[in-house]
Amino acid sequence: MKRIKKDDLVKVIAGGNKGKIAKVTKVEGEKVYLEGVNTRTRHVAANRLSAQGTKRDIQLPVDASNIVLVVEKTAGAEKVSKVSYQVKNGAKTRIAKVNSKEVK
């Protein structure tokens, strides 16, 4: 079980995007893709299908060690937490360490 999953709200804690809050769109191993964070412009050359070259925005991943889960978000402030695991009735669930509540 991963500590960060798709559709989680996370905060970037290191790198050029430090402090930004975003929603997780995809997780691939230890790389996490965030909505609107770490985008680059890719220049695409002309080919048979399109006579003119174009610019396209691509999404680059952020390492999972550089983000932390946002547990509560209020007006102007957010509460972040590390994630631990707990086994209940044979099922493994994610628990926020800051308030010991289950993370959906």
Image (tube, grey):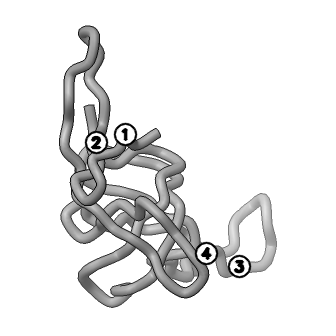
Residue at 53% x, 61% y: name it. Answer: 23
Residue type (three-letter) at the residue carrying disc 4: Asp
Q: What is the CA distance from the residue labelled 2 to the residue labelled 1? A: 4 Å
Q: Residue at x 30, y 29 (%)?
A: 93
Q: Secondary structure at mark 4?
A: strand
Q: Residues within 10 Å of mark 1 (few under 14, many from 20)?
A: some
Disc 3 from disc 4: Cα separation: 10 Å
Residue bearing the label numbered 2: 95
Residue that label 3 marks: 54
State how many labels appear: 4
Residues at badges 3 and 4 in contact (C-beta under 8 Å)?
A: no
From the viewer's perspective, tell me whether residue 57 is left or right of residue 18: right
Label 2 close to label 1 by CB (< 8 Å): yes
Which x, y percent locates residue 47? Answer: 69, 66
Q: Which mark is residue 40?
A: none
Residue occupied by mark 4: 57
Q: Residues within 10 Å of mark 4 (few under 14, many from 20)?
A: few
Q: Earlier in the sequence, mark 2 or mark 3?
A: 3
Is 35 located above or below residue 103 in the figure?
below
Q: Nearer the viewer, mark 3 or mark 4?
A: 4
